[in-house]
Amino acid sequence: MADPRRAAAILGTQTKWVNGTVLHYSFFTAGHYAVPKKQADAIRGAFAKWKAIGVGLGFQEVSQLSEAEVRIGYSTADGSSASAVGRDVLTVPLSEPTTVYGWDLTTPYGSGTALHEIGHVIGMEHEHQNPFAGIKWHEQAVYDALAKPPNSWDHDTTFHNILEKLTAQQVQGSTWDPDSIMEYEFEPGLIDEPQQYDVNGLTPPGTLSAADKQWALKWYPPLQASLTALQPFQPAVLDLAAGQQVDFTIKPTSSRKYTIETKGASDTLLVLFEDINGVPRYLSGDDDSGDDRNAKITYKLFQGRTYTVRLRLFYPGASGHTSLMYS
Ligand SMILES: [Zn+2]
């Protein structure tokens, strides 16, 4: 990709879900990752806190792991808490957890952990890796501290989770938010600069900060009550900024195979849902980001049913225009 703005826009948008997605989550109930009931309740409560911001994402618990995008495990034996980030959860094999908790989530610290991993699930990265943070580390002290229990991390894991700087596009904003739920707690002696944290350590409050809520509402604003209907063979011309999303309904007048596709040199994520009893059910998606082709879904749609098509723009391309059509 010759255009660095295109690469940056894709990197910054790729892990975000299309707004309006209902993420199904499920708990392991047996084996190594079995989640005790009181831990599951703490995680349910954390999903409710994220939803209470007013985000257009939905979270729905299902009993079958095989039906869940987000598969949650618990293991104090492993002792670490971690999650795949955003749409990367879809790349985790179905038999494995996407999100694992490694300690008690019913303490004040644990309730922050419950929220933090869900932050990863919706596409957030670590705030201490924000390149705008200006954090200088006592690197060897960080490796030594994290090599000890409960983390027992190897060199690469510590580098990946703490020392490695993210790109400007991967983080929440242009300034550092030490109160973010995506910030870790650090003991004194690990952060060299800003110096106050070297002396006092860093103890984030473990709750959703104002900037966390802003970020969530920017990517997942409240859903519009009614959407414009896309008409067959009539392209909708769109002028979207990088990261923006547009949604349409489709109400087919006959049952047959349809093609929904974008035109133009834009990079997009196109997702098709069917409305089933008011809940959007994912049918198909196509991500053309980084490819010189258009996003395209071919799917059999049925007369009398209602579908929603959601298009998230990664990068508008040279013309700045994208169009969407179904035929
Ligand atoms: Zn994390």
Image (spheres, rainbow, N blue to C red):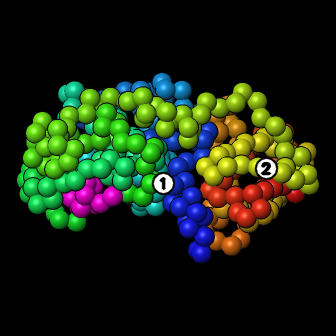
- 109 up-or-down from 72: above or below: above
- The residue where tag 2 is placed is 238
Amino acid type shown at disc 1: Gln
Q: In which quarter of the image is residue 281?
A: top right
Callout 2: helix, strand or loop? strand
Residue 316 in view, yes or no: yes
Tell me the chief SS of the magenta region. helix
Residue 27 horizontal/vertical position (percent): 36, 41
Q: Give the camera-side residue of 126 and 319.
A: 319
Q: Give the camera-side residue of 305 and 200.
A: 200
- The residue where tag 1 is placed is 169
Residue in view at x 54 percent, y 34 percent? 217
Q: Identify the image quadrant of the N terminus.
A: bottom right
Residue in view at x 9 percent, y 55 percent? 141
Callout 1: helix, strand or loop? helix
Instruction: Find the magenta span and give its range.
Output: 157-165
- Give the left or right position of residue 78, taking residue 227 as reference: left
- 247 up-or-down from 137: above or below: above
Residue 172 horizontal/vertical position (percent): 44, 44
- Give the left or right position of residue 161, taking residue 326 as reference: left
Residue 95 horizontal/vertical position (percent): 38, 57
Pointer 1: residues within 10 angstroms few (<14), some, or many (20+)? some
Amino acid type shown at disc 2: Leu
